[in-house]
Image: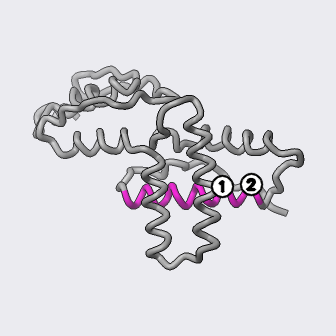
């Protein structure tokens, strides 16, 4: 992948310069990069020099998008798509709860927070706040909501993979 160093910009170096300030541990090599860790809470408010390369600008934009903004856009897409008010309210309630959970440690939740590991912790936290455990159907509804949102994000942002790949639906009796 050495050719990435001689495109519109040195894309390997530019990716490092976009991701390091938000807390990603990344090393560049002659023909690529090694990412050794992504922070649980990426740092925000970082200025980026896209070097005149729209791909680097898109990387920076996607890395910094607040999850709250994406939820609002998703709700609009559901409305335009003709989903029922009840379905939209149900999805919004679960997604608002997920965003609130991911934002508890301070700062705005971002796209990086949408991962199977964070989703599982959210489901455990939802269980812990109740006197009686959530039913398998309630858990499955939350998982379906997150997976539908993740699928929409993959299509809308042209992500290379579904952000929640690996988040399995629980068995429902």
Residue in view at x 45 percent, y 43 percent = 111
- Looking at the image, the residue that sits furthest to the right is 132
Q: Position of residue 51 (x, y in %)?
A: 13, 35
Q: Which residue is mark 2?
A: 139
Residue in view at x 59 percent, y 43 percent = 100
Residues rendered magenta in the picture: 138-156
Above or below — where is 68 with respect to 76?
above
Residue in view at x 53 percent, y 30 percent = 106
Q: Position of residue 85 (x, y in %)?
A: 59, 74
Quadrant holding the N terminus: top left
Above or below — where is 19 with respect to 138?
above
Q: Which residue is mark 1?
A: 143
Report the magenta stretch's main SS. helix
Q: Residues within 10 Å of mark 1 (few under 14, many from 20)?
A: many
Q: Residues within 10 Å of mark 2 (few under 14, many from 20)?
A: many
Q: Position of residue 54 (x, y in %)?
A: 18, 46
Verify CB contact (< 8 Å) between mark 1 and mark 2: yes
């Amino acid at each position: 992948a050495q050719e990435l160093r001689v495109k519109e910009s040195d894309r390997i170096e530019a990716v490092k310069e976009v991701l390091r300030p938000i807390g990603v541990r990344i090393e560049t090599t002659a023909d690529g990069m090694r990412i050794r860790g992504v922070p649980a809470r990426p740092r925000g408010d970082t200025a980026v020099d896209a070097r005149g390369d729209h791909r680097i600008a898109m990387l920076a934009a996607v890395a910094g998008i607040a999850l709250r903004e994406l939820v609002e856009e998703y709700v609009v897409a559901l409305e335009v798509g003709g989903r029922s008010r009840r379905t939209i309210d149900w999805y919004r309630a679960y997604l608002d709860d997920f965003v609130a959970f991911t934002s508890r440690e301070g700062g705005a939740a971002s796209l990086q927070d949408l991962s199977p590991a964070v989703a599982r912790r959210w489901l455990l936290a939802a269980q812990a706040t109740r006197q009686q455990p959530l039913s398998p159907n309630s858990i499955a509804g939350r998982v379906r909501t997150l997976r539908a949102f993740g699928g929409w994000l993959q299509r809308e942002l042209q992500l290379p993979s579904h952000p929640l790949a690996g988040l399995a639906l629980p068995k429902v009796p």
